[in-house]
Image (cartoon, rainbow, N blue to C red):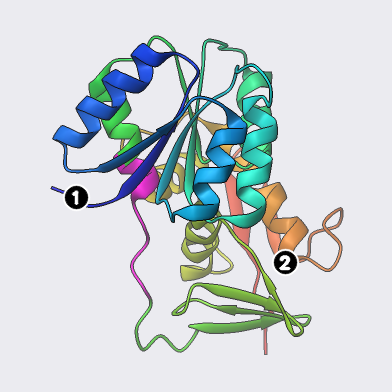
Amino acid sequence: MTSARILVVDDEPQIRRVLRTTLSAQGYEVFDAKTGEEALLSIRDHRFDLVLLDMNMPGMGGLAACREIRAGSDAAIIMLTVRQGEGDKVAALDAGADDYITKPFGMPEMLARIRAVLRRMPTVQGNEHARIQLDGVVIDLAARRVRRGTEEVRLTPKEFDLLHYLLATPHVAIPHTKLLQAVWGPDYGDQVEYLRVFVNQLRKKIEPDPAKPRYLLTEPWVGYRFELPRP
């Protein structure tokens, strides 16, 4: 059983009711909201581990709500939608979502996705590379924090997990499938668009020039590698 706190945001009462009942039975603490605006008010008053967010809602849409949530919260976000196109998936991930699931969905799949986004890479203990400095950016793996100069750089939990995994074996090309399964879980492997979006976001946050990456490099047709400065 788990005590993670989840916010369900959907304008359909039946979906909110089913998710609340099912997730509560799994030991999660569940809140719900029927609009993006209501969700933002709830997030100001409570800390959530995960937000299940409908993409298509009246008023503030899911993408706008996702961007607002991500700007001030490190909660995991799973976007729910009836759309299945890759462009919609990329838009959701680009807005700050950690994962994406299409309606209608089965509860076993939903529960697996929730477990996947709530997974965290283990904290580094006693690692000589636990604190890494790159052109004024300091990555503290043990504390799961990144700073640029005196300012903290906000990374989502999955962004940090991906960065952590790449840094664990620097200078080595890691295949797409291996990265996906290490960070999201064994049920993943084909979602290359996830990596493309997350790597682009990381480059914006840690590279001196994201358009010409120096550290987080693409290995065409293979995956990604992290080049640490050599002594």
Which mark is first along the chain, 1 or 2?
1
Query: What amino acid is at disc 1?
Result: Thr
Q: Position of residue 47 (x, y in %)?
A: 44, 56
Quadrant holding the C terminus: bottom right
What kind of element bears circle 2?
helix
Q: Position of residue 202 (x, y in %)?
A: 67, 56
Q: Residues within 10 Å of mark 1 (few under 14, many from 20)?
A: few
**Residue 84 at least partly seen:** yes
Identified at 51% across, 48% down, the residue is 43
Q: Position of residue 56 (x, y in %)?
A: 60, 17
Up/down of 192 relative to 215, above or below:
above
What kind of element bears circle 1?
loop
Q: Nearer the viewer, residue 12 or 129?
A: 12
Q: Position of residue 185 (x, y in %)?
A: 34, 42
Which residue bears the numbered disc 2? 206
In the visual, does 78 lie left or right of 152? left
Up/down of 207 relative to 150, above or below:
above
Find the magenta span and give its range: 115-123
In the visual, does 136 lie left or right of 155? right
**Residue 218 at least partly seen:** no
Identified at 36% across, 58% down, the residue is 120
